[in-house]
Image (spheres, grey):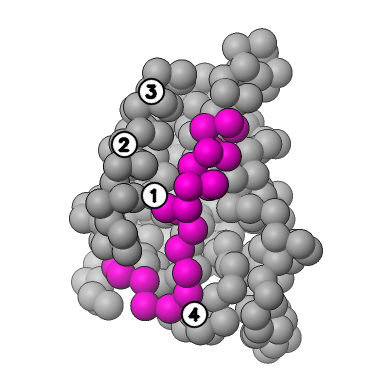
Amino acid sequence: MEKIKNVKINKLPSLSIFFPFWNEEENIAKVVASTIPIANKVAEKWEIIMVDDGSTDKTLEIAKRLAAKDKRLRVVTHQPNRGYGAALNSGFSHAKYKYIVFTDGDLQFNFGEVTKFVERIPEADLVIGYRKKRRDRNLLKRLLLMYLLKLNVFILFRVHFKDIDCAFKMFRKEAIETIMPIRSEGAMVSTEILAKAKRKKLRIAEVGVTHYPRTHGDQSGANFQVVLRAIFESFILWWDLKNGRY
């Protein structure tokens, strides 16, 4: 994984970092170990929240072992698996510091690039990443599904960003609190966040990030059932927003 240049930045006063994990026993220890020195670099005080979304492997066991060694590490768990949106909702709900950042726990992003988000957050309420070049398995299939969902989202919500579903985002805590609770438990969670942020007239900045191939674990984003659930959730979200339920 490419190293990030040692650029001097102003530290954030406090930062909550969280990772959603689902069957990531081969990745979780590496993710946390590589995050700690970066957290020290970008924040005066910080926490790392490991959200285990009903893993059936040793992910939760490893998370608890890591947390037992460092009081700045915390574990939140779901039983059974509830979905990606539910994992994000738990991360946001348990975060206690002024700024919040999350990315996936599958090592497809370099957390060192969080410096790009830290540089932009003074001028924004949320900073969202976009993958400069996607490195997914089954890339053609995923791109096709992504464009279909992107079209669906634009038609329903008039929301357009370079990469709505990029799993690397930073928020001011007070900004995410204005759009809580998050109801989408599946793949529409990012759309819900951004659609509600737009309605609240929050300031949104975009930064390009590097995307890496997954080397361990399974991806579910190209699963047809996931896409069907996302489309179903999009109509529920549209109806709720239309009728002022948020």
Crowding at mark 4 (Cα within 10 Å: few <14, some 14-19, many 20+): some
Q: Secondary structure at mark 3?
A: helix
| Residue depth check, mark 3 versus mark 2: number of the one nearer the observer | 2
Q: Which mark is residue 154?
A: 3
Q: Which portion, as a residue range, is magenta?
A: 212-233
Q: Secondary structure at mark 4?
A: loop
Tell me the residue at 67%/63% (across/down). Answer: 53
> Farthest residue toward the top?
243
**Distance in Å between CA atoms under marks 3 and 4:** 34 Å
Q: Nearer the viewer, residue 9 or 172?
A: 172
Q: Which mark is residue 221?
A: none
**Distance in Å between CA atoms under marks 2 and 4:** 29 Å
Sequence order check, earlier mark of 1 and 2: 2
Where's residue 116, x and y in %? 31, 55
Q: Secondary structure at mark 1?
A: loop
Dot 3 amino acid type = Phe
The quarter of the displayed image where residue 79 is located? bottom right
Sequence order check, earlier mark of 3 and 1: 3
The quarter of the displayed image where residue 113 is located? bottom left
**Distance in Å between CA atoms under marks 1 and 4:** 19 Å
Query: In what quadrant of the picture does the N terminus appear?
Result: bottom left
Where's residue 233, x and y in %? 59, 32
Sequence order check, earlier mark of 3 and 4: 4
Above or below: residue 3 compared with residue 10: below
| Residue depth check, mark 1 versus mark 2: number of the one nearer the observer | 2
Sequence order check, earlier mark of 1 and 4: 4
Where does label 4 land, which residue? 27
Magenta highlight on residue 85:
no
Tell me the residue at 66%/11% (across/down). Answer: 243
Dot 2 amino acid type = Tyr
Where does label 2 land, which residue? 147
Where does label 1 land, which residue? 166
